[in-house]
């Protein structure tokens, strides 16, 4: 959820920018930019402000009811959702957790057939000015737009300046953690970004260093400007004006939270081994371990470990498809959090913990220390014994946890959406715009047109 949350925050702040005209565009399947209509803009505002229904909640309802909810969401949208929506919605409709099984595949097929039908029946768009063809524009392209353009080699029509966000180089640096198809696509998309962007804005200093090294090696004659705009977490800020809950206990026990996609590099297996070792030692003093996140890929070892140790079922809980309000309630109610990921570009889940004042034990992945501002205990990602010791201390030493909470309260500096947006815009403004003009187009599939220097950015 990290990339969508960051790009959503960027779009939301661009929409709230009242000091300059703002325009947005989508990139179609031909690689053309299409400016959004008023109807589409109105829908986009509601979407990023969380005012529209999503394929979550209501899992207890019947299959036809869940399917109708998803089709209604798609029907109301003035533009077509991407393929990731199909997968997430199919999980909801099928009532499953993983992206597999006959029910999931049938649900995904039904969703995509409805998409095709809607595209066929939808009136043809009015041709609009394409900012990508405007040599006086600088356009921001989202990860989805980059994939659309790079996969179809549609670069020849682009005349504008380009800047993009770089979240990580994990499929290049750690190919063993991703599927080969995804790795090939990522390598292609990254090469496109390096070859065609004038500015690469990275989410952490660690990612910026890796991108700079990779660009220098892979394209020594074409290294774009590389800058850093750390995105913060944004969840707490996003739900601040909504009704909040606090989940204190799960099945009568305190709980420890790990919020991330369930996949191999996130290292959930280490936590299962830790809980398995500590259960006979701590007994009822051991909190429930809550894994909150969608199922990704290469999680077979985790599933096998749970099957081999059925006693863990009472102590490990999986949560998928939670709303932002439910996730915020988990952060507010947890005793502490854990983040043993082997590799990260930023570490959104770790930063979210500190936003809610929640202590988190992190791995030695460099970006996690950066995301938590060097304030939280760091444990080697592969050292089970060290993790056992740290978790046991957190479970039995309330004074230590109180000290960590006090450290967060006194020293942690949250990064707000507005600040992230202003930092990113300052990097764009610092470019030599003489070759590209002074019109700026921004987010998503989406772009914002603005003056070179904003007088203020409203939140």
Image (cartoon, grey):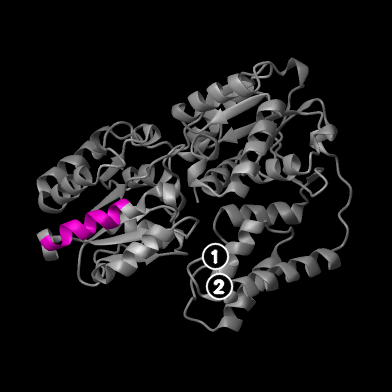
Please tell me whether residue 441 is drawn above or below residue 259 in the rendered image.
above
Q: Is residue 334 visible?
A: no
- 143 lies left or right of 208: right
Q: Is residue 307 visible?
A: yes
Q: Nearer the viewer, residue 4 or 389?
A: 389
Question: What whole-number distance in Å separates the C-alpha atoms at marks 1 and 2?
Answer: 7 Å
Q: Position of residue 114 (x, y in %)?
A: 74, 71
- 33 lies left or right of 433: right
- Dominant secondary structure of the residues highlighted in magenta in the image: helix
- Circle 2 residues within 10 Å: few <14, some 14–19, many ≥20: few
Q: Quadrant of residue 20?
A: top right
The residue at which mark 1 appears reads as 99
Callout 1 secondary element:
loop
Residues rendered magenta in the picture:
270-280
Please tell me whether residue 219 is drawn above or below residue 446 in the rendered image.
above
- Circle 1 residues within 10 Å: few <14, some 14–19, many ≥20: some
Q: Which mark is residue 231?
A: none
Q: Nearer the viewer, residue 398 or 423?
A: 398
Q: Position of residue 131 (x, y in %)?
A: 80, 36
Tell me the residue at 47%/64% (across/down): 321
Q: Which mark is residue 101?
A: 2
Quick check: marks 1 and 2 in contact, CB under 8 Å? Answer: no
Q: Quadrant of residue 269?
A: bottom left
Does the segment drawn in magenta span residue 408? no
Callout 2 secondary element:
loop
Does the segment drawn in magenta span residue 272? yes
């Amino acid at each position: 959820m990290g990339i969508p949350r960051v790009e959503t925050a960027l779009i939301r702040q661009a929409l709230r920018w009242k000091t300059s005209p703002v325009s947005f565009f989508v990139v179609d399947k031909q690689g053309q930019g299409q400016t959004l209509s008023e109807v589409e803009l109105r829908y986009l505002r509601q979407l990023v402000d969380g005012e529209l229904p999503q394929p979550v909640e209501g899992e207890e309802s019947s299959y036809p009811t869940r399917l109708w909810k998803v089709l209604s969401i798609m029907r109301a949208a003035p533009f077509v959702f991407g393929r990731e929506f199909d997968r997430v919605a199919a999980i909801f409709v099928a009532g499953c957790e993983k992206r597999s099984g006959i029910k999931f595949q049938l649900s995904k097929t039904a969703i995509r057939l409805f998409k095709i039908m809607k595209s066929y029946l939808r009136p043809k768009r009015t041709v609009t000015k394409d900012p990508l063809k405007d040599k006086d524009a600088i356009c921001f392209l989202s990860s989805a737009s980059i994939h659309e353009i790079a996969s179809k080699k549609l670069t020849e029509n682009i005349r504008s300046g380009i800047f993009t966000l770089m979240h990580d180089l994990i499929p290049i640096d750690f190919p063993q953690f991703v599927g080969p198809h995804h790795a090939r696509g990522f390598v292609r998309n990254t090469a496109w970004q390096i070859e065609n962007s004038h500015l690469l804005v990275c989410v952490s200093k660690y990612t910026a260093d890796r991108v700079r090294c990779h660009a220098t090696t892979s394209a020594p004659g074409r290294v774009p400007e590389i800058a850093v705009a750390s995105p913060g977490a944004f969840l707490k800020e996003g739900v601040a004006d909504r009704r909040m809950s606090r989940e204190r206990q799960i099945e009568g026990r305190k709980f420890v939270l790990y919020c991330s996609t369930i996949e191999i590099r996130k290292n959930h297996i280490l936590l299962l081994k830790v809980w398995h070792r500590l259960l006979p030692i701590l007994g009822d003093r051991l909190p429930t371990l809550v894994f909150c996140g969608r199922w990704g890929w290469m999680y077979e070892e985790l599933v096998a470990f749970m099957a081999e140790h059925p006693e863990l079922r009472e102590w490990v809980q999986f949560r998928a498809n939670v709303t932002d309000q439910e996730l915020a309630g988990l952060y507010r109610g947890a005793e502490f959090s854990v983040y043993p990921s082997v590799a990260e570009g930023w570490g959104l889940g770790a930063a979210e913990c500190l936003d809610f004042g929640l202590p988190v034990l992190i791995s030695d992945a460099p970006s996690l220390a950066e995301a938590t501002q060097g304030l939280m205990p760091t444990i080697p990602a592969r050292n089970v014994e060290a993790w056992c010791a740290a978790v046991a201390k957190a479970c039995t030493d309330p004074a230590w946890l109180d000290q960590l909470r006090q450290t967060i309260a006194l020293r942690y500096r949250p990064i707000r959406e507005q600040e992230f947006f202003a930092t990113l815009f300052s990097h764009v403004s610092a470019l030599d715009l003489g070759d590209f003009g002074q019109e700026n187009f921004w987010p998503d599939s989406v772009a914002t047109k603005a003056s070179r220097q904003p007088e203020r950015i409203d939140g």
